[in-house]
């Protein structure tokens, strides 16, 4: 079974437990298109709900300050809609309709999941990247204590789709730039030439927001190289497990 097939099987087995699938496939950079506007904050909250959001932001800021954790109000691409289309030659394409939100809006809308509707979530786009080393191991990082969500827990690599950094040469949104940047930031290694497959979008129903799911397969990056890299800037530890069988 290939790594991609194993991830597909794992995703199906977890469907409905923690997340739901928004779209699934195997997309190259050329098979992903983006529809804007890319620079407009498009959240529309009622006055009462905006007040609740601000109260949650203030509470999250206080918790982060007490725990000496990072809590910045960065801008993040927001997912408005995701769907697939077919090109003239029958090739499947992924289309992402984007808006703009912020980390504060995310912190203010991710609570009380059962008390709000889907349209009340900020829906920032995160990324989940499964890395398979050239000698067949899967590294996972233990999140640093200084992060605001899930500190100290073991996770795959990733982060939010950043409108200020994740762009192509034309200045347009580029999800693959996000994948490579996050891998570089968390591991301190160069992923410019690494094969990365965008497998689709899942929706995290615990911390409500969409996650772009990717598989990275370097041809010459062993587990020893990953383990000895400069990951200590963002993580507290690296765990290695056997790849999918």
Image (tube, grey):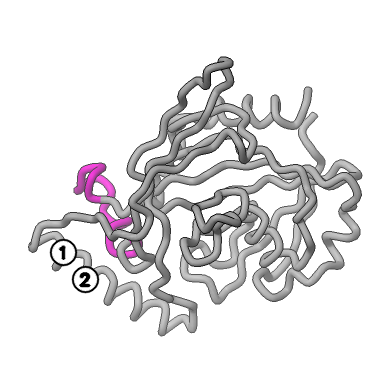
Q: Position of residue 163 (x, y in %)?
A: 46, 61
Residue holding disc 1 = 50
Question: Residue 30 has which mark?
Answer: none
Element marked by disc 1 = helix
Q: Quadrant of residue 210?
A: top left
Give the residue drawn at x 81%, y 41%: 242
Q: Quadrant of residue 169?
A: bottom right
Give the magenta range: 106-120
Instruction: Please tell me whether residue 188 is drawn above or below residue 44 in the rendered image.
Output: below
Instruction: Please tell me whether residue 212 is drawn above or below residue 68 in the rendered image.
Output: above
Residue holding disc 2 = 54
> In the rendered view of the protein, which quadrant contains the N terminus?
top right
Q: Give the crowd class for mark 2: few <14, some 14-19, many >=20 residues within 10 Å.
A: some
Asked whether disc 2 touches disc 1, contact meaning CB atoms under 8 Å apart, the reply is: yes
Q: Nearer the viewer, residue 130 or 167?
A: 167
Give the residue drawn at x 25%, y 55%: 42
Q: Nearer the viewer, residue 130 or 141?
A: 130
Instruction: Please tell me whether residue 47 is drawn above or below residue 89 in the rendered image.
Output: below
Q: Position of residue 227 (x, y in %)?
A: 84, 62
In the image: residue 205, left or right of residue 225: left
């Amino acid at each position: 079974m290939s790594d991609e097939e194993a991830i597909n099987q794992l995703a199906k087995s977890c469907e409905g437990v923690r997340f739901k699938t928004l779209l699934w496939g195997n997309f190259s950079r050329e098979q992903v298109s983006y529809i804007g506007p890319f620079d407009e904050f498009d959240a529309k909250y009622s006055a009462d709900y905006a007040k609740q959001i601000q109260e949650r932001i203030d509470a999250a800021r206080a918790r982060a300050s007490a725990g000496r954790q990072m809590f910045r109000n960065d801008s993040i691409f927001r997912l408005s809609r995701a769907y697939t289309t077919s090109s003239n030659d029958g090739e499947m394409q992924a289309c992402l309709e984007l808006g703009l939100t912020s980390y504060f809006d995310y912190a203010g809308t991710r609570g009380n999941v059962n008390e709000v509707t889907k349209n009340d979530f900020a829906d920032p786009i995160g990324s989940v990247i499964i890395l398979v080393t050239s000698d067949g191991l899967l590294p996972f990082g233990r999140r640093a204590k200084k992060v605001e969500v899930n500190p100290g827990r073991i996770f795959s690599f990733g982060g939010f789709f950043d409108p200020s950094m994740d762009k192509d040469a034309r200045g347009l949104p580029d999800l693959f730039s996000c994948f490579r940047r996050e891998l570089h930031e968390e591991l301190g290694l160069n992923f410019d030439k690494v094969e990365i497959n965008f497998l689709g979008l899942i929706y995290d129903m615990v911390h409500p927001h969409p996650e772009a799911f990717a598989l990275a397969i370097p041809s010459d990056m062993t587990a020893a190289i990953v383990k000895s890299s400069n990951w200590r800037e963002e993580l507290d530890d690296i765990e290695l497990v056997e790849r999918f069988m």
